[in-house]
Amino acid sequence: MNTGALKYLILICSVAALGGFLFGFDTAVISGVVGFVKSEYAMSAASEGWFVSVALLGCIIGVAGAGKLSDSYGRKKVLLLSALLFTVSAIGCCLVKPEVELLWFRFIGGLGIGVASMVSPLYITEFAPAKMRGRLVAVYQLAITVGILCAYFSNAWLLGLSEQSARFASEGFLNWIVTAHVWRAMLGIGVLPAVIFMLSLLAIPESPRWLMMKGQKVAARKWVYKVNTAEQAHLEMAAMQDGVHQSTGDKTGLKELMKPIYRTALIIGLVLPALSQLSGINAVIYYGPRILDAAGFTLGGAFGGQVSIGIINMLFTFVAIFTVDKWGRKPLLYVGAGIACLALIIIGFLFYGGVTEGPWILLFILIYIACFAFSFGPVCWIIIGEIFPTHIRGRAMGLATLSLWVANFFVGWLTPILLDHAGPAGTFWIFAVLCSPTIWLTFKLIPETKGHSLEDIEAYWLNKSKVNK
C-alpha cells in the first residue's frame, strides 16, 4: 500500500472512530456530574443509578434499531444520525431544569451513542484490509479511551474554573452554567466533538462492502482501489463478490442468524460483549470518584485519580494496536482477562481489610484498567466485527452491541446499590466472578482470526458446520 492510500485509509477510519470518542466522552463525563446532580435533586441510590443508566437504556434502543437501519440506508447515514442525536442531547442537558426533561435528553444522547457504538466499528471493519483490520478497529477503542480521558480532564478543568467564581459576575447565564451548576457545563461541552463528528462524516465515503451488497459495484470498486494496491484491490473485490454470491437469496433477519452455521458465532457475539461489561469496567468509569472517596481520597484527589485511570486506559490501548495483528486476538484475551480477575480480587481484599491509606487500591485499579485496555476493550470490537458474514453483519453486530449495552445498563444501575449493600469489597468480588468465564469462552469457542479476510472467516464457519454434521 502506498503512503497516500495509507493516509487516506487512516483518515477514513479516524473519522469513523470519532463515534468511539463520543461513546467514551459520554461514558466518563457522568462520573463528574453524578455527585452534583444527586445533591441538587436529592436522589436516592436507586435514583442515582437510574440517572446514570437512563442513557444506557437509550443505547440499548439505539443499538436495537441500528443494525436494520445501517443495512437498509448505509453505515454513513446512520453515523450522521448518531452525531445529530448526541448534539441535541448535549444542548438539552446543558439547558433544561426539570429532572424529567434532563432524563429525556440523557436518553436521546444514549440513542446516538448506541447507534455509533455499533456502526463505527462495523464501518471500520468493512473498510480495513485483512492485515491491518485488527489495528484499525483497535483505533476505535483508542478513540473511546481518548474520549474518556478528555471527559476527565474537562470535568477537572471545569471544576477548577467553577471554584474560582470571582472571575465571573454574580448573575447571568455564565455564572449559572459554569459556577452555580458546573455539571451543566460538563454535559454541554460535549456538543463540540459531536458537531466535529457530524461535519467530518460528510467528507468520507460509504462502506464498500455495503455498496457491493446493494449492487453498487462501480462505487465499491472505486473506494477499494483507493485504499489498496491494484493486486490487493483485485483480490478484495473478488472476495467481496464471492461473499455477495454466497449470500444471494439469503435473508438478513434474525431467522438467518439462528441457522446452525452461525450458532457459535452468535454465542460469541452475545456473551463476549456482555462479559466485557460485567467485569466492572464502567463501575470504575461511572462511579470512580465515589469508589476513590471510599478508598480515602479527597474530592480533588478522586478527580485526579480518575484522570490517571483515563491516562492508563489510553496508553495500554496502544499495546493492543501494536500487537493484535502480530500476536493475535486470543493471547490478549487470555492475559488481560486473567490478570484483570486477579486485580479485582485483590481490590476487594484491600477494601475488606480497610487498607484506605496509601496508593494500593488506586494501583490495583490501574492494573485492572490496563488489562481491560489491551484485551476486552479493543479485542471485543475486533472479534464481533469479524466473525459474521457481510449479509448479516449489520444485524449481528446490532445484537452483539445490544448485549454489551444491556450488561452495561445493569452495571450502571446496580453499582451504587451494590456499593451501599455489599460494600466496595463485595462489589469488586462480584465483578471478579463475572469476569472469569471469559477465559473459558476464549479457550473453547473463539477462533483466532488474525490475518484472515472476512470472507475466509465466513468460510471457516461454513466448513465447521459441514464437519459437525
Image: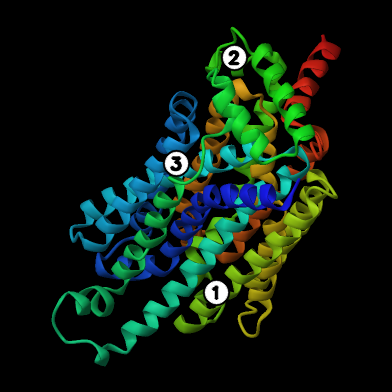
Disc 1, SS: helix
Can you say whether 375 is above or below 384 in the image?
below
Mark 3 lies on a secondary structure that is helix
Amino acid residing under circle 2: Glu
Density class for disc 2 (Cα within 10 Å; few <14, some 14-19, many ≥20) is: some
Which residue reaches farthest bottom?
Answer: 166
| Between discs 2 and 3, the one toward the N terminus | 3
Local crowd size for mark 3, using a 10 Å CA cut-off: few (<14), some (14–19), many (≥20)? many
Please identify the quadrant where the N terminus is shown: top right
Residue 420: x percent and y percent?
46, 62
Determine if residue 430 is in view: no
Which residue is rendered at x = 72% and y = 60% of the image?
371
The residue where tag 1 is placed is 307
Residue at numbered disc 2: 256
Q: CA distance from mark 3 to mark 1?
A: 29 Å
Please tell me which residue is depicted at 78% across the width and 54% down the height of the picture.
338
Q: Nearer the viewer, residue 5 or 406?
A: 5
Label 1 and label 2: CA atoms lie apart by: 45 Å
- Residues at marks 3 and 1 touching, judged by CB atoms closer than 8 Å: no
How packed mark 1 is, by other alpha carbons closer than 10 Å (few <14, some 14-19, many 20 or more), is many
Instruction: Give the image location of residue 318, x and y in percent.
Output: 71, 61
Q: Nearer the viewer, residue 441 or 153?
A: 153
As shown in the figure, which amino acid type bears the numbered disc 1? Val
Residue, disc 3: 79
**From what the image shows, is residue 68 above or below residue 333?**
above
Q: CA distance from mark 2 to mark 3?
A: 25 Å
- Quick one: 41 or 262, which is closer to the camera? 262
Q: Disc 3 marks which amino acid? A: Leu
Q: Nearer the viewer, mark 2 or mark 3?
A: 3
Does residue 232 show up?
yes
**In the rendered image, which quarter is residue 30 located in?**
bottom left
Mark 2 element type: helix
